[in-house]
Amino acid sequence: MTGLPHHSASMNHSDARLVTSVSRHRPLHGFTLIELLVVIAIISLLVSILLPSLNRAKEMARGAVCMSNLKNINLATAYYLDDSDGFLVPLSPGRISGPDVGFISGWMDQLYPYHEDINIYLCPSAIRDKEKTVYIARSDGVYYVHQSGGYGYNENIPRNLSPTGDFGNLVKLDQLQNACELIFIADSDFINSPPNNNNYFITENILSGWAGSISTRHGAAEEGNYDHSGGNYLWLDGHVDYHAAGEAFDNKRWWMPNGYISYNHKLQD
């Protein structure tokens, strides 16, 4: 009988340790609704702060690729000039035969053999699907580039130095007195719908209805924002740079070979 109290005490002590052990491993309480809402609000704020910076960084990277494309186009042009006795690649030498019967052959076709990489004709910031339809068609051993990649040839170079306004007019580089300040090839926004994929040449206008027009795809990359968004430009002397759309529109002389605005009519001072 004397051992019973001792046994009972031993059981109570064990129970106490069990209770203590259970209490130590009891799970913590979860977040309250207010705490969850605060966390969500903080995350949303951080995203709103960081996302524009991330988008700007991505656009800067795409802009760098675009400039590299234009430099490679310039390199292909240099090789072409060596083979053509100094004549610039024609904007549009004529219509082709083969799988794309009636399709207009243009400057991309002529340059392709000198840099056989279709990607240099595609601006990574081309935002419309119809601007990204660049492909190679082959007919009778000749390659033809479908000209809707987002880059346009300054149409004024051949047309304004031609008595008849001919797109296929051949122009020698040494004929151009203002090569260092004359746009050659540039980002070209797409206006027309297929099959009139006319942004392979570019006019000095914004929102042109019949050809490629001054681009707003880089910079702030806001369509219609002419002061803070624009395009990249390859000049006839070989340098590449960026200009806002409004700046490119205001400087008409950048587009006019030797100051001619159309069919041998001079731009007035």
Image (cartoon, helix red, strand yellow):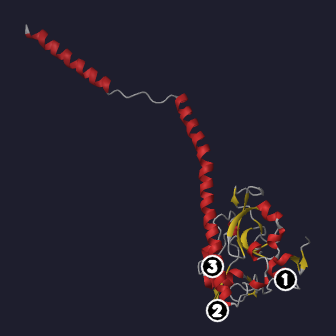
Rate crowding at label 3 as few (under 14), some (14 to 19) or many (20 or more) other CA atoms within 10 Å: some
Q: Pointer 1: what residue? A: 161
Residue 150 in the image: x percent, y percent? 70, 70
Identify residue for label 2.
140
User: In the rendered structure, which amino acid carries the disc numbered 1?
Assistant: Leu
Q: For numbered disc 2, what is the local secondary structure?
A: loop
**What is the quadrant of the C terminus in the image?**
bottom right
Q: Secondary structure at mark 3?
A: helix
Residue type, label 3: Leu
Residue 138 coordinates in the image, percent (x, y): 63, 86
Residues marked 3 and 1 touching at CB (< 8 Å): no
- Give the labeled residue for mark 3: 75
> Is mark 2 in CB contact (under 8 Å) with mark 3?
no
Image-quadrant location for residue 14: top left
Give the x, y percent position of residue 125.
65, 63
Say what secondary structure mark 1 lies in: loop
Instruction: Give the quarter of the figure containing the N terminus.
Output: top left
Task: Point out residue 212 in the picture as x, y percentages from the top left corner.
Answer: 77, 70
Discs 1/2, front: 1
Q: Nearer the viewer, residue 220 or 136?
A: 220
Q: Nearer the viewer, residue 11 or 152?
A: 152
Residue 135 in view (yes/no):
no
Observer able to see residue 55 = yes
Q: Earlier in the sequence, mark 3 or mark 1?
A: 3
Q: Quadrant of residue 196?
A: bottom right
Name the residue: 19% across, 16% down.
13
**How far is mark 3 from mark 1, CA to CA?**
24 Å
Q: Which dot, 2 or 3, sits closer to the camera?
A: 3
Q: Earlier in the sequence, mark 2 or mark 3?
A: 3
